[in-house]
Amino acid sequence: MAGSRARGGMFMAAFGTMWLVGGVLGEFPSMPWLAAIAVAFGAALFLANWRALRAQPAALEVETSAEAQRIARRFRLVNLGQWAAVAAAAIGLNAIHRPQWIVPAGVAIVGLHFLPLAALFRNRAHYLTGAAMVALAVVLPWQVPIAAAIPLLCLGAGAVLWLSALSAART
């Protein structure tokens, strides 16, 4: 299970870095060097999880059991559903002339996708990751103007994913 968490940590480090870079470039466009620092830290976090995965030789073996195949199939379905929901939200919000809500919707959808993954991988930390991202997406746009909320949502989503990746690297 720890190998699975480290593998997930690699994904969270990568996607967290993408969210953070988007937030940094949106909030501090005149300081692109901050984005470069985020990429460097994200790479370090990715490598920490990669090392945690490599430290468990059993985690590197290809699992062919029926249970492993069932988990892999459900994982793919959850992720397919997430990307389909993000695409549908973007298309729908553009159609009703509310593109400023695409980022909050995306953060909420990404957060929600962690809930079935928590049960699938028996990883209670995913519930916290998902809840934190959904809370950000729901609360932040109502506290600050939507234009200001977008880069803050990106930064917040990236920070949540990085914290989750850091936790995964330590297990």
Image: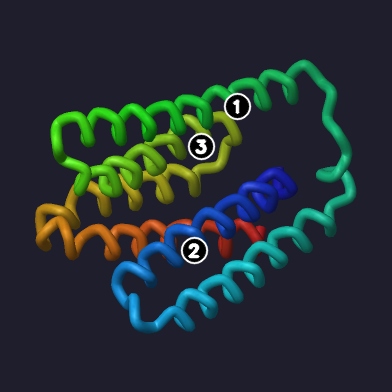
Q: How far apart are marks 1 and 2 (CA)?
A: 24 Å
Q: For residue 110, which numbered disc appears in the image?
A: none
Query: Residue drawn 16% across and 54% down?
Result: 141
Q: Quarter of the image holding residue 88? A: top left
Drawn side of residue 132 relative to residue 122, left or right: left
Q: Where 113 sits versus 165, above or below? A: above
**Left or right of residue 107: residue 1:** right
Q: Looking at the image, which residue is at 56% across and 71% down?
A: 39
Determine the residue located farthest toward the top in the rendered image.
66
Q: Give the residue pinned by disc 2.
A: 163
For this rendering, which residue is in front, 87 or 124? 87
What's under tag 3, amino acid-wise?
Answer: Ala
Mark 2 Cα within 10 Å, few/some/many (few <14, many 20+)?
some
Q: Which amino acid does label 2 sit on?
A: Leu
Residue 110, how many percent across, how many down? Answer: 41, 41
**Labels 3 and 1: the sequence-earlier one:** 1
Query: What residue is disc 1 on?
Result: 76
